Amino acid sequence: MILELIFCFAATVAFGVIFNVPNRVLWIGGVIGSLAWFIYSTLPTYGMSDVFATAVASLVCATFSHLLAKKYRVPVTTFSIPAIIPLVPGSKAYFTMLAFVEGDYLNGIQLGVETMLRAGAIAAGLVFALSIFSIGKGGIGQRYESRRT
């Protein structure tokens, strides 16, 4: 598990470099990504489904991203985008396409549904955290629209 977390940290920091995250906060995104991976890989051992574990890990990732973005005065996406990378079901999407190409349609549909559920869980975690941090600001719509008088 420690080796997985080290590789996860390195991968998250590498994606942070690709996305031009400032050097002073680059390591924080790596820690958030490692935390998200730890939650994702630990919860199924307690009987949770992979989709639920992905949703919880995404919510924790987005929550820490919002909190630390305020502290370090950077956009939330500086932390959340690289930190979500370990949760993205890339291998599931690959095996879904491989199953369809090989003609195993039932397995392809099963893998595809699981891939879409995990991707939806990531999106749900991010949106739920955004809605929590938008409560005192007049709602999500007020964040992006100018006030009309």
Image (cartoon, rainbow, N blue to C red):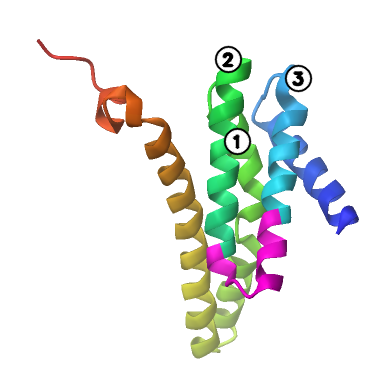
Q: Position of residue 51 (x, y in %)?
A: 54, 67
52 displayed left or right of 29: left
Q: Which residues are magenta?
A: 39-52
At numbered mark 3, what does the secondary structure look like: helix, strand or loop? helix
Q: Position of residue 41 (x, y in %)?
A: 71, 62
**Amino acid type at mark 1:** Phe
Residue at 60% over, 61% down: 89
Residue at 70% over, 43% down: 33
Residue 70 lies in quadrant: top right
Placement of 73 over or under 31, stated as above or below: above
Residue hosting label 1: 64
At numbered mark 2, what does the secondary structure look like: helix, strand or loop? loop
Residue hosting label 2: 73
70 displayed left or right of 31: left
Residue at the outermost left position: 149
Mark 3 burial class by Cα count in 10 Å: few <14, some 14-19, many 20+: few
Q: Position of residue 132 (x, y in %)?
A: 40, 37
